[in-house]
Image (tube, rainbow, N blue to C red):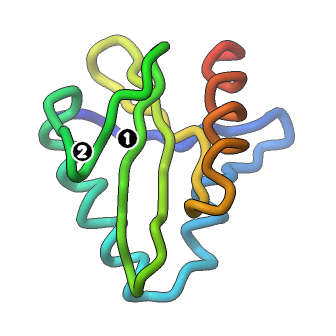
Amino acid sequence: MWEIEFFEDKRGKKPVQDWFAKLAKPDQKEIAKLLGLLEIFGYELALPHAKNLGGGIYELRAKAKGAGYRVYYTFKNDKIIILLVAGDKSTQQRDIEKARNLKESL
């Protein structure tokens, strides 16, 4: 089983955790369900739930109340999944770029 961690910035903030806390409860439940699958399957979780974007960045794909949510993550040491960035489809390109930059800083 994989361990999921939230990326923590220099100020001690965990952006994905903060983003998740602001979501409606039904949306939180949907994303939590997918995070549970990610914990179990890791690299093996595939479409429609997850997608390898290349360069060590992966996308967890959640659909809740018509919104397309995305959580971007990477793997560390074949034991840990680090959640880097999260958002919806409207911020997808910016979020992917940010996830790539954060991964490089790990």
**Location of residue 79 with respect to 49 vertically, above or below:** above
Image disc number at residue 38: 2
Q: Classify the position of the N terminus by image quarter.
A: top left
Locate residue 38, reporting x and y percent: 24, 44
**Along the line of sight, the residue nearer the viewer: 30 or 67:** 67
Q: Classify the position of the C terminus by image quarter.
A: top right
Q: Residue at x 18, y 51 (%)?
A: 37
Image disc number at residue 4: 1
Is the residue marked by circle 2 packed among few (<14), some (14-19), or many (20+) residues within 10 Å?
Answer: many
User: Is the Cβ of the residue at disc 2 closer than 8 Å to that at disc 1?
Assistant: yes
**Location of residue 33 with respect to 61 vertically, above or below:** below
Quadrant of residue 91 in the image?
A: bottom right
Give the residue type at disc 1: Ile
Which SS class for mark 1?
Answer: strand
Locate residue 94, reporting x and y percent: 72, 43
Closer to the chain start, of discs 2 and 1, is 1
Q: Residue at x 66, y 13 (%)?
A: 104
Q: Residue at x 47, y 26 (%)?
A: 57
Locate residue 73, reporting x and y percent: 47, 35
Locate residue 48, reporting x and y percent: 21, 51
Give the residue type at disc 2: Leu
Quadrant of residue 11 in the image?
A: top right
